[in-house]
Image (spheres, grey):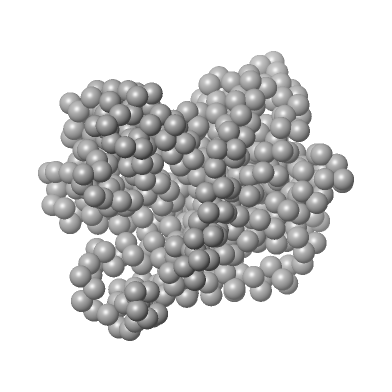
Amino acid sequence: MEAFSNWVTTVDDLVWGVPLIVLIMACGIWLTVRTGFVQVFHLGKALRFMVQNEEDGTGEVTSFGALCTALSATIGTGNIVGVASAIAAGGPGALLWMEIAAFFGMATKYAEGLLAVKYREIDSDGHVLGGPFYYIEKGMGKGWKWLGKLFALFGMLAGALGIGTITQINGITSAAENFFDPAKAHVVFTVGSGDAAKGITVTTVVVGLIVTVAAALVIIGGIKRIAKVSEIVVPFMAVIYVVCGVVILVANVGKIPGAIAQIFVGAFNPQAVAGGIIGVTMKTAIQKGVARGIFSNEAGLGSAPIAAAAAQTNNAARQGLVTMTGTFIDTIIICTMTGLSIVITGAWKPELGLQGAEITMKAFDDGMFFFPNAVSSFLLMLCLMFFAFTTILGWDYYAERCLEYLSGGNMGLVRVYRWIYIAAVFVGPYLTAAVVWNIADVFNGLMAFPNIIALLALSGVVAKESKAFHDKLNH
């Protein structure tokens, strides 16, 4: 088992290596140029469209509902754990590279949303199916259908093998256990043996059951119910987290200039702020920051356009703008809040020996020094749980649509898959997430290759549609 785990880790490192990161960044830069810097000149318009649904639009859910469905999968533990891990490995400068990746990623997300709506299919019952598989097949031609199938296969496997199930429910139960029973004083039974033994507490069992039932009630209802729940939960959880971030920044306002200086210096000369720590180089800062940024906002991976295709809209470019706001909210706002809090409080420093969520937890505890630690810890736990729960919902939708495309619209098979997905959520708390996460991570990264090829091939279509839309608005 250890050999298999090491092999999976090696493959994961290869998939998420420099070539993929360079490819995604190059695509974002190219699309930024082709769209005339859409993320700069049309961001205000995009934010306005985000909350202004089209009354006569065709689709299954509102534009805002489609965005919230995408954000439900995008805003996840990566916003809390991923940012902390990037800064811990690459120093404060990793945050700036994360922001740079997000800036160009906004143009990528715009193109994904536009193409998803342009090439989607709507049947006689109003059911919508769209995403990279269709803009590959219909935009690039039937000869490329195999590439669309490949994307759908990778997407379905990423969802089925843990990114939306086992890893997320593990995150939820671990967060609850760390808060309510950190000493594991109430172990009910043990799974595994030897060093791999895992004690299952009452907290894990109860929270696991509650989340499974809640997820089942939403998932069985399909996209419309997922969208309705996401429209409520996503803004709620995002607001709570942003408010916490603002409170930390206001309480430590005098430290903000110094933190920003650390971030900029660290982006180009990491050792100047990392104290000469071995391994912290500019290359490390760039790689960790860009990789975590891409992983957090999913720009270029091809997941968000699956949700965007269901939007009630008659204009592809308009939905592209709405889709683009997802990256702005996820990384420019939420990840920045996390990163600044971590740098301001110094929670990232290696000598503290903290990792992942522990870093963000210390940043919250130290940043909100006027509250008892139990309050800040509870708020972070609540955010982690909501973030992970909505990721369960969002990735079920993505995986279902990929399966629907692969099976030629066999909805009976999709309904069976829903129960398999729910079963995975149920057993998730009792499994070890590490290997499963790496496997899902591999398929998640593999999704990007077919999608990026399509975005580059269809960049001319994106430019043409964008020009027509903006010319119409200006006249």
Asked if one can make out residue 50 in the rendered structure from this viewpoint, the answer is: no
Front residue (pair 147, 418)? 147
Q: Nearer the viewer, residue 117 or 179?
A: 179
* Left or right: 358 in relation to 171: left
Q: Is residue 310 left or right of residue 356?
A: right
The location of residue 314, given as percent across then percent down, is 72, 38
Relative depth, front residue between 377 and 82 = 82
Q: Which residue lies at the image location 23% right of the left edge and 54% below the top edge? A: 377
Q: Where is residue 269 in the image (x, y as percent from the top left)?
A: 35, 24
Q: Which residue is drawn at 33% across and 65% down?
A: 174
- For residue 180, side relative to residue 457 (left or right): left
Quadrant into which the C terminus falls:
top right
- Across and down, in percent, residue 366 comes to 17, 44
Quadrant of residue 472 in the image?
top right
How many numbered marks appear? Answer: 0
| Residue 300 found in image quarter | top right
- Residue 400 showing in the rendered view: yes
178 w.r.t. 259: above or below: below
| Residue at the outermost bottom position | 189
In the image shown, does 237 or 95 lie closer to the viewer? 95
Write down the quadrant of residue 412 in the picture: bottom right
Q: Which residue lies furthest to the top in this view?
A: 475
| Residue occupying image coordinates x 44% and y 31% | 283
The residue depicted at 25 percent of the width and 43 percent of the height is: 350
Q: Where is residue 187 in the image (x, y as percent from the top left)?
A: 27, 80
